[in-house]
Amino acid sequence: MFSTILVACDGSPQSEKALCAAIDGCMSKHTSLHVVHIMNIKSFSAIESETSYDGVESPHEITRKILEKGKDEAVCMIEDMCGCKNIEYTFHVKRGDPRHAIMDLAEEIGADLIVLGSTGKGLATRVIMGSVSSYISNHSHISTLVVR
């Protein structure tokens, strides 16, 4: 039914459930699975600087290492889950606001399904902080599966 599935994965138990659902959705060898790991570092804009500090790592280099560490942990989990079902996948690392990064990548790869985990946040937290899954399901024209 779906040919290109995008699943957001941050290593949380909710995203692991979303990954399982996405893997189960790969019913055919013709299904393309894309996994995205997003680092939300917009509040640390100084880290983006390319400035060198006399032999000390630049904030840009520190950011790259943070992204790679997150990628390594997520890739290990995904390989364990996909390997047992012989599913090939493409792994993406993005930075920024997860709501926009997920929707932008979904458009870029031509996804016809976005799979997300639900954090189970209460109403007050969702009102104050917002919910990635709520935002995407309300603003994306691509089918969205929120796994609880």
Image (cartoon, grey):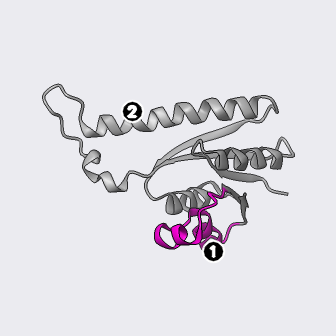
Secondary element at tag 2: helix
Secondary element at tag 1: helix
* Residue 74 shown left or right of residue 112 in the figure: left
| Residue denoted by label 2 | 65
Which image quarter holds the N terminus?
A: bottom right
Residue 118, picture quadrant: bottom right
| Residue denoted by label 1 | 138
At a point 46% along the width and 71% down the height, the residue shown is 128
Check whether the beta carbons of the residues at disc 2 and disc 1 lie within 8 A of each other: no
Number of other residues with Cα within 10 Å of mark 1, as a class: few under 14, some 14 to 19, many 20 or more: few
141 or 146, which lies in front? Answer: 146
Residue 123 placement (x, y as % from top left): 58, 72
Query: Alpha-carbon distance for marks 2 and 1?
Result: 33 Å
At a point 43% along the width and 52% down the height, the residue shown is 40
Residue 89 placement (x, y as % from top left): 69, 39
Establish if 75 lies above or below 39. above
Asked whether residue 98 is drawn in magenta, I would say no
116 or 118, which lies in front? Answer: 118
Question: What span is in magenta?
Answer: 117-142
Given the current orientation, which residue lies at the most extreme left position?
A: 54
Which image quarter holds the C terminus?
A: bottom right
Establish if 67 lies above or below 39. above
* Residue 52 shown left or right of residue 133 in the figure: left
At a point 56% along the width and 55% down the height, the residue shown is 105
Instruction: Answer with mark 2 or mark 1, whichever residue precedes in sequence.
Output: 2
- Amino acid under label 2? Lys
